[in-house]
Amino acid sequence: MSKPRSPMPIPHSDALTGLATREAALARLGEWLPAGDKVHAVHIGFRRFDALNLAYGTAAGDAALAEVAQRLRHFASAEIEGGWLAARDGGSRFLLIANEPCSREVWQLAAARLLDALAKPIVTAGGTLRLSPRAGLLRATAIDNPESVLDRLGQTLANAMALSGRRLAWADGEATRLAISAAQLEADLIQALDRGEIEVVYQPQFSCQDNRLTGAEALTRWNHPTLGKLGAGALFTIAERADHVAQLSGHIARLALTGAQKWPMDLRLSLNVTPADLASADYAAQLAGLIKQTRFAPWRLTLEVTEQVLLGDVTHAAEVLGKLSAQGIQIALDDFGAGFCNFRYLQLLPLHYLKLDRAMIDGVAGNPRDLAVLRAIIAMARALDLKVIAEGVESESQRQLAVGEGCSHYQGFLRAQPMDGSAFQAFALAN
């Protein structure tokens, strides 16, 4: 008799998109659900995706799914401060699970913005694809278990897919009426800058070599008087509609630089750069002026740019970043490894750091192929004299992996969650 086959190991990441698998989502829900009532989830599908595959070819369809995964990760990184997991649930269906306090209204607003991002045209070699996303929403209850969460989400998504005029559906069947209009939100944002509702929080960063605190990335949120806390994704989406991105970005930079000026002098500040920033003809001069006004040392500042920021005009972006780099400011390419990486950026941009997407660290140790990719990226960075930052480090095993493979820095919930300025200053003095 032949020997019985050993059970196949549960794959941690989806081969096409790099996202977690359904099995990984179940495991994560098993960790989060017993801890309280903070779990929120959205299940996403695309109507008529099979027709797109037939029209454009499966290669174009696969490229579209990979781009969806990248947009999903980018959205979660910008929008969710607590823990989150993005997964592919087979075919053209995706999951986003968050573990942080959030009202129904804010979660519905976030889901609507996510669908807007996923509905934007996707350019592939086979043609330009326009997807039609739908979503099922859920807030976990005390009686839920991982299987019931995904079962309820799946049924809710099926209901949303069947309704041609409705993009979102809640698992409990109750629609949430938004208490505030889009126009009012835009007006509120303009006033929020003066009312001090825009807050900067700091995600600490640490040295892989000796685990010491080295600085922090500045993140932002809006403490809306009616809706409560809104993340950076919501904030900048509203700012775009109000044509207020430049003012918002400058306001955040001023807050972050002013707060960081009080830190011990060896700590660095990282600021995220928006597409509107780089598109502005005088961004470099404005930022230089702001640095001078706040008396912040340029050599302590790192600007983080993502591929999405660079898509407009990479040559112009390289010129602007080059001017800033010449003043001593360092440049990091953020979310590296998410989706398709354009290696031309490594040739054109004055880079000092590669910041790995969290998917490049999460679960890599158990996957020889993923580990080989990680090692290749780090070896390439070393050859280009670039330091590597590991993002999304949530466990000691992930930190040890980052250290062992040669990353220079890491950040994530293992050591600290984002904190306000006073809390970070106390944290810095204690570390």
Image (cartoon, rainbow, N blue to C red):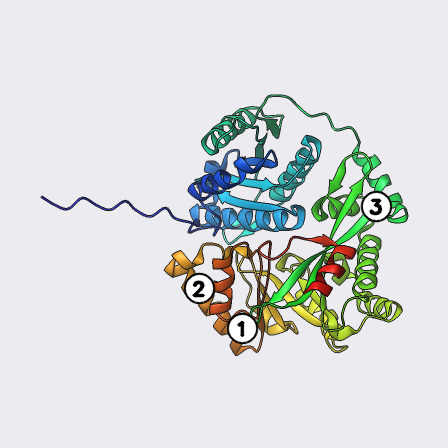
Q: How many marks?
A: 3
Write down the quadrant of residue 163 in the picture: top right
- Residue drawn 59% across and 25% down? 164
Horizontal side of 54 relative to 166 (left or right) equals: left
Residue that numbered label 3 is attached to:
197
Q: Can residue 282 be seen in this view?
A: yes
Tell me residue 338's x, y (percent): 54, 56
Q: How crowded is mark 3: few (under 14 residues within 10 Å), some or many (20 or more)?
A: some
Residue 148 lies, in percent from the top left, at: 48, 28
Q: Is residue 330 above or below residue 304?
A: below
Query: Which mark sits nearer the N-terminus, 1 or 2?
Result: 2
Q: Residue 381 carries which label?
A: 1
Mark closer to the chain start, 3 or 1: 3
Identity of the amino acid at label 2? Val
Q: Do the residues labelled 1 and 2 touch (CB within 8 Å)?
A: no
Residue on which the image places disc 2: 373
Q: Which residue is the extreme one toward the front?
A: 430
Q: Position of residue 358 (x, y in %)?
A: 54, 56
- Left or right of 309: which side holds 13? left
Residue type of the residue flagged with mark 1: Ala
Q: Residues within 10 Å of mark 2 (few under 14, many from 20)?
A: some
Judged from the image, the secondary structure of the residue bearing numbered disc 3 is: loop
**Identity of the amino acid at label 3?**
Glu
